[in-house]
């Protein structure tokens, strides 16, 4: 892949959420559908944002009927509410569930039909409503991508709706939100961002621009995730750098795709409702180890990026990088695969769905169901 797209206006700084009213005024947007992650209900953030919008003179309607692996039906319901409210902009506050739901809802609000009709790339005729993303985790990257990944519970699978017009118009990446994120979610979502960056870097769609973004994201997470986690998000510098890394990783994989880790994690999420970031965090190192023979040079290059003083040959560098990733996962208490409680008899179906995943061709080596099954069985011992 040689092209690179990033039409989203991005603001990355503590407190940038307060720029929202200015952005609405600049564009003349005044009727807002606010899509909120219900997991934020115990925090001050939803009311803080609603008050900000109301004080700016906006008419606000709230949608918060979301699940951790967002459903097609939620996007449809949000789109219906957007039309009923005559919304001229959607604002999403939350993690990947809120952001992916909002992107799909913005498209469905202007393109009537069953969400399944739009699965694939650029299957819609009318531009979506404008959308502003305020990510409250440090992993989704959805604030800077053109894809909405939603669950089809009837088929026990995840589907992707992609479109050139589905990039958020504005992303407000405010690390203040991480102060109330539980440490376990800091760990899982940041390791999700690490997965985005690493898979963008080793996959067949990698390009020079995505490589630069991925390298920077990986280095930031390598050095700042652990202090962000151990301080429960109170270390301001670590918090800022982890938030920045998440967005950089989103820009990387949004232009270079993901690969085998995501093929497995999306299958597990669709079949067993495993949180996406947690699944990626658990699977990242095992999948990389399986693919190691064909990515030695790339892993070695990453090791020298995160540790400029590293000496040794490429094989040693690749090993050191994988060991460092595993150690980082341990430092932030990523649990073992067994903690997901996936029944052994289901592994074959998980592997088959992984092979059928749209990102499977982006793997650095051919991956069939048998390969995925080998990884899963090894994890269960």
Image (cartoon, rainbow, N blue to C red):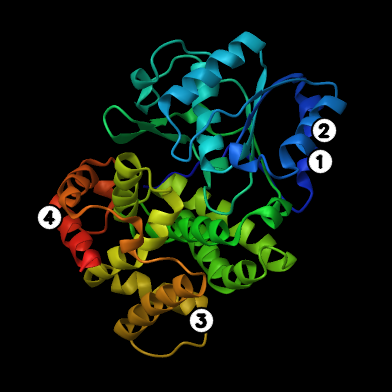
242 sits to left or right of 190: right
Contact? badges 1 and 4 (CB < 8 Å): no
Q: Residue at x 52, y 48 (%)?
A: 140
Give me the C-alpha separation between circle 3 and circle 1: 37 Å
| Mark linked to residue 114 | none
On the rendered image, what quadrant is the C terminus found in?
bottom left
| Mark linked to residue 307 | 3
* Element carrying mark 4: helix
Check disc 2: other Cα within 10 Å, few if <14, some if 14-19, many if 20+.
Answer: some
Judged from this view, the residue extending furthest toward the right is 55
- Whether residue 1 is visible here, answered yes or no, is yes
Give me the C-alpha separation between circle 1 and circle 4: 50 Å
Q: Which residue is mark 4?
A: 370
190 sits to left or right of 345: right
Give me the C-alpha separation between circle 2 and circle 1: 8 Å
* Element carrying mark 3: loop
Q: Which residue is mark 2?
A: 52
Q: Which residue is mark 1?
A: 18
How far across and down, in percent of the image, does residue 105 sit?
A: 52, 23
Contact? badges 2 and 1 (CB < 8 Å): yes
187 sits to left or right of 342: right
Check disc 1: other Cα within 10 Å, few if <14, some if 14-19, many if 20+.
Answer: some
Q: Residue at x 29, y 51 (%)?
A: 264
Instruction: In this rendered view, identify the residue nearer to me: 156 or 93.
Output: 156
How far across and down, in percent of the image, does residue 286 sit?
A: 29, 67
* Element carrying mark 2: helix
């Amino acid at each position: 892949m040689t092209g690179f797209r990033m039409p989203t206006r991005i603001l990355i700084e503590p407190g940038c959420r307060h720029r929202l009213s200015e952005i609405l005024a600049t564009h003349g947007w005044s009727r807002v559908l606010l899509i909120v992650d219900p997991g934020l209900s115990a925090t001050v953030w939803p009311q803080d944002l609603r008050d900000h919008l109301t004080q700016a003179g906006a008419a606000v309607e709230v949608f918060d009927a979301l699940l951790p692996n967002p459903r097609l039906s939620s996007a449809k319901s949000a789109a219906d509410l957007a039309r009923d409210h005559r919304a001229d902009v959607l604002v999403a506050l939350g993690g990947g569930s809120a952001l992916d739901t909002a992107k799909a809802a913005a498209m469905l609000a202007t393109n009537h039909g069953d969400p399944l009709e739009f699965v694939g790339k650029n299957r819609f005729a009318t531009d979506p409503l404008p959308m502003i993303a305020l990510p409250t985790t440090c992993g989704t990257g959805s604030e800077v991508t053109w894809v909405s990944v939603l669950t089809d519970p009837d088929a026990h699978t995840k589907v992707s709706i992609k479109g050139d017009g589905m990039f958020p118009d504005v992303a407000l990446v405010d690390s203040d939100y991480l102060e109330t994120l539980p440490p376990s979610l800091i760990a899982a979502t940041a390791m999700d961002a690490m997965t985005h960056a690493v898979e963008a870097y080793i996959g067949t769609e990698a390009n020079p621009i995505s490589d630069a973004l991925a390298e920077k994201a990986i280095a930031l997470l390598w050095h700042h995730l652990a202090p962000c986690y151990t301080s429960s998000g109170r270390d301001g510098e670590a918090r800022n750098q982890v938030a920045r890394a998440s967005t950089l990783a989103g820009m990387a994989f949004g232009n270079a795709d993901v690969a085998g880790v995501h093929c497995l994690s999306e299958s597990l999420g669709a079949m067993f409702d495993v949180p996406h970031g947690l699944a990626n965090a658990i699977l990242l190192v095992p999948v990389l180890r399986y693919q190691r023979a064909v990515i030695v040079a790339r892993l070695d290059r990453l090791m020298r990026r995160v540790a400029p003083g590293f000496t040794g040959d490429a094989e040693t560098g690749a090993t050191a990088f994988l060991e460092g990733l595993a150690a980082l996962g341990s430092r932030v208490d990523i649990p073992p695969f067994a903690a997901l409680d996936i029944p052994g008899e289901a592994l074959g179906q998980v592997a088959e769905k992984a092979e059928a995943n749209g990102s499977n061709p982006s793997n650095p080596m051919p991956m069939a169901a048998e390969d995925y099954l080998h990884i899963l069985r090894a994890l269960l011992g």
